[in-house]
């Protein structure tokens, strides 16, 4: 119960503050500005400082296999389900993404930080570092296929989508932190100047609350749209099936470290990320479905994440 009070209440309380700000003070243009500040300064500082303390040998690659093996399996199971519901290929891909893509940055980073501190960020950032690269690139490829592009064009779009994901400020920050950690292990006298580290530390402290406000304000601007039934199905898969399968794979197939297993499961239980809505908007495909999936899963995750915390026995006191 302490975990619910110490994690759920501050996380979703801050999301609620963001929602109020989005309904009153933050215009669409203001939200875009806040998003740029968060993704190009606050989160990179947090991610770099966190990963700069980690040695490569301390990482567990199995978490990638567990998380994305499960995610990809469910993605390709949701595709025929979408087809059975009468969806075309592009709609199926958005439907599948809605049921598998977690909001690991905006909500996941604050959530895990409040629960486990920097130790919990290491496994989470491993997942985040390839989340967009794999899932969004796959969805973009399928959306291009659904639009009827030629084979050469599809390959070019696939490569372009992967390159775009690698250019996202979150991913380079993670790898830069790891590279710095390895460099300082070879040159022990090398260190970030104290003044610069203080700036990075100040930016890093602002990242979690800013991310939550950003998530809440985004919900205020997105709102509910049509096609709520398939969105509800995707939400059920995202909040119940995905975390259960990730936990089972990490517990029985790969025997992950307990902390890493807990973080992977909690990340799997997060609501659908805003990128689902952005991809749908970009391709003008199933925008209503994606919108509802983000809104419904975010609201429902208040309860499902509380249950997952209790089942995993997470304690903060």
Image: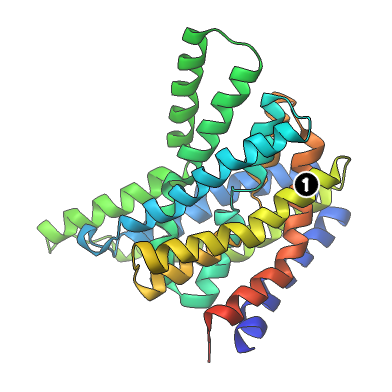
Q: Identify which residue, 110 or 69, lies in the foreground.
A: 69
Report the side of 201 relative to 243 (left or right): left
Report the side of 183 relative to 111 (left or right): left
Q: Position of residue 314 (x, y in %)?
A: 53, 82
Q: Position of residue 170 (x, y in %)?
A: 47, 47
- Whether residue 122 is visible, yes or no, is no
Q: Is residue 46 above or below residue 156?
A: below
Instruction: Assign a secondary structure to mark 1.
Output: helix
Q: Position of residue 85 (x, y in %)?
A: 78, 35
Disc 1 packing (10 Å; few <14; some 14–19; many ≥20): many
Quadrant for the N terminus in the image: bottom right
Residue in view at x 73 percent, y 56 percent: 297
Residue in view at x 54 percent, y 36 percent: 136
Quarter-wise, where is residue 28 in the image?
top right
Q: Identify which residue, 131 or 218, lies in the foreground.
A: 131
Residue in view at x 85 percent, y 46 percent: 228
Q: Which residue is mark 1?
A: 231
- Whether residue 80 is visible, yes or no, is yes
Residue in view at x 38 percent, y 52 percent: 64
Q: Is residue 202 above or below residue 168?
A: below
Q: Is residue 288 above or below residue 62?
A: above
């Amino acid at each position: 119960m302490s975990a619910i009070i110490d994690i759920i209440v501050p996380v979703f309380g801050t999301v609620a503050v963001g929602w109020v700000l989005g309904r009153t003070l933050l215009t669409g243009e203001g939200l875009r500005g806040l998003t740029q500040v968060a993704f190009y300064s606050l989160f990179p500082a947090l991610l770099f400082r966190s990963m700069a303390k980690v040695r490569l040998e301390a990482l567990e690659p199995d978490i990638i296999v567990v998380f994305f093996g499960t995610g990809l399996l469910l993605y390709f199971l949701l595709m025929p389900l979408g087809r059975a519901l009468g969806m075309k290929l592009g709609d199926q891909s958005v439907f599948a993404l809605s049921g598998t893509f977690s909001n690991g940055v905006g909500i996941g980073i604050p959530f895990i930080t409040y629960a486990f501190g920097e130790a919990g960020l290491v496994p989470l950032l491993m997942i985040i570092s390839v989340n967009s690269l794999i899932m969004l690139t796959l969805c973009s490829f399928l959306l291009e296929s659904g639009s009827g592009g030629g084979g050469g064009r599809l390959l070019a779009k696939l490569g372009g989508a992967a390159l775009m994901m690698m250019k996202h400020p979150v991913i380079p920050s993670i790898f830069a932190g790891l590279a710095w950690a390895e460099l300082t292990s070879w040159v022990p006298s090398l260190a970030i100047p104290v003044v610069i580290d203080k700036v990075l530390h100040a930016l890093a402290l602002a990242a979690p609350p800013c991310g939550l406000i950003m998530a809440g304000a985004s919900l205020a601007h997105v709102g509910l749209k049509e096609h709520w039934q398939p969105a509800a199905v995707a939400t059920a898969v995202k909040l119940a099936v995905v975390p259960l399968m990730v936990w089972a794979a990490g517990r029985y197939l790969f025997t992950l470290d307990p902390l890493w297993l807990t973080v992977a499961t909690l990340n799997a239980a997060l609501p659908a990320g805003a990128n689902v809505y952005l991809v749908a908007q970009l391709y003008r495909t199933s925008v209503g479905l994606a919108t509802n999936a983000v809104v419904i899963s975010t609201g429902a995750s208040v309860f499902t994440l509380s249950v997952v915390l209790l089942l995993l026995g997470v304690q903060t006191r």
